[in-house]
């Protein structure tokens, strides 16, 4: 289904096609069948208002640089979809995330392997009894997250904040400098508002999914999200998603994932946002398995 079809689609038609649509790309037939049944059971319990609410949300999601709160029905489906696709998830160091949020404004900086990273992080936390923390994650997302209907529906089950793609990334479309600056400024302002409202702002500071499998340098401009007074940064590392949905893949291969959090770092004590960003690169690298660690001589910032 193309996004352009949403505006002309009746809500009942969307819900009727949803279970099959959400399993089309799952390679394992048994997992696809089980997931389809789980989604079907979700839909039978929804009120008549669910279809129009989802349709209205999808039609506007990602159009403005603002925090989009997860659509409740989409969040439910996202967590049900993840049960068989991401089995036996591993969670480490969650106490660090909880302690940071209890202390004040918190940013999570994580490596980026796959389009399913954010869905996987939400699933791992919820599956281990920390749905309250998953509900407080708000992820800064590039425009490709909203570019097709499958990714847009996945984003609808999460709290997301659109941001323009950096022009430092050669494989992305470039914006004019004024438009890029305007959108980037609006995204940073919305991120600060989310932090003040008690959300943990999650960023992938490499700027895009790694093309080598190794942790790459962090984009220098990410420091703009780290200027909130009293901010703490929680380093995070995800692994396994590179096998579930690799870069340039068209099918999802079910498999386990691991999410780990490290001790929070105080931005002020590290000398400010720019120095903190460089320090966190090493902290994220320390949480990764050897195959995902930075290649030798990788600079922390570019």
Image (cartoon, rainbow, N blue to C red):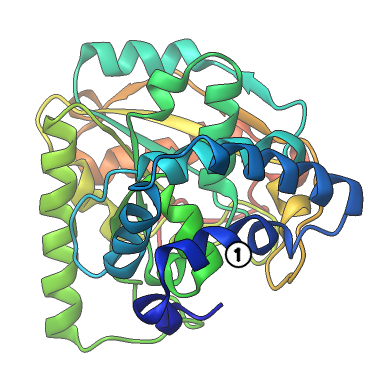
Residue found 46% across the figure and 21% down from its top: 131
Q: Position of residue 162 (x, y in %)?
A: 29, 61
In this orientation, which residue lies closer to the viewer: 6 or 134? 6
- Nearest the eye: 283 or 88: 88
Vertical arrangement, residue 182 with respect to residue 17, above or below: below
Residue drawn at x 18%, y 84% as measured from the top left: 177
Q: Check the image and report above or below for 124 versus 208.
A: above
Residue 205 showing in the rendered view: no
Numbered marks: total: 1
Instruction: Specify the quadrant that holds the C terminus.
Output: bottom left
Disc 1: CA contacts within 10 A as few (<14), some (14-19) or many (>=20): few
Location of mark 1 (residue): 17
Would residue 131 be found to the left or right of residue 160 on screen? right
Q: Is residue 173 visible?
A: yes
Indicate the quadrant where residue 210 lies.
Answer: bottom right
Please tell me which residue is depicted at 26% across the width and 50% down the height of the picture.
68
Is residue 227 placed above or below 145 in the rendered structure? above
Image quadrant holding the N terminus, namely: bottom right
Residue 183: x %, y % from top left: 17, 70
Q: Secondary structure at mark 1?
A: helix
Q: Which one is in front, 98 or 300?
A: 98
The spot of residue 241 in percent (x, y) is 69, 47
Horizontal and vertical percent for residue 83? 69, 34
**Which of the pair 77/180 is nearer the observer?**
77
x 56%, y 40%: residue: 44
């Amino acid at each position: 289904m193309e996004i352009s079809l949403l505006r002309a689609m009746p809500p009942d038609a969307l819900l009727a096609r949803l279970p099959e649509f959400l399993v089309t790309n799952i390679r394992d037939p048994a997992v696809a069948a089980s997931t389809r049944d789980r989604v079907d059971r979700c839909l039978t319990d929804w009120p008549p208002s669910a279809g129009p609410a989802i349709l209205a949300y999808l039609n506007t999601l990602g159009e403005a640089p603002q925090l989009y709160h997860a659509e409740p029905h989409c969040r439910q489906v996202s967590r049900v979809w993840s049960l068989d696709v991401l089995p036996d998830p591993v969670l480490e160091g969650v106490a660090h995330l909880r302690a940071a949020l209890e202390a004040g404004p918190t940013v999570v900086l994580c490596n980026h392997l796959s389009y399913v990273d954010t869905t996987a992080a939400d699933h791992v936390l919820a599956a281990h009894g920390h749905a309250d923390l998953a509900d407080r994650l708000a992820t800064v997302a590039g425009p490709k997250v909203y570019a097709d209907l499958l990714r847009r529906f996945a984003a609808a089950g999460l709290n997301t904040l659109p941001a323009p793609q950096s022009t430092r990334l050669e494989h992305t479309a470039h914006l004019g400098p004024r438009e890029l600056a305007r959108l980037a400024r609006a995204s940073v302002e919305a991120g600060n508002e989310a932090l003040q409202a008690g959300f943990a702002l999650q960023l992938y500071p490499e700027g895009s999914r790694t093309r080598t499998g190794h942790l790459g340098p962090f984009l220098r401009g990410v420091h703009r999200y780290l200027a909130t007074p009293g901010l703490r940064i929680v380093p995070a590392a995800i692994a396994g998603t590179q096998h579930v949905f690799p870069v340039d893949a068209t099918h999802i291969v079910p498999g386990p994932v691991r999410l780990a959090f490290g001790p929070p770092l105080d931005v002020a004590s590290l000398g400010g946002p720019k120095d903190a960003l460089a320090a966190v690169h090493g902290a994220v690298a320390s949480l990764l398995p050897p195959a995902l660690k930075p290649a030798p001589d990788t600079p922390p910032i570019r």
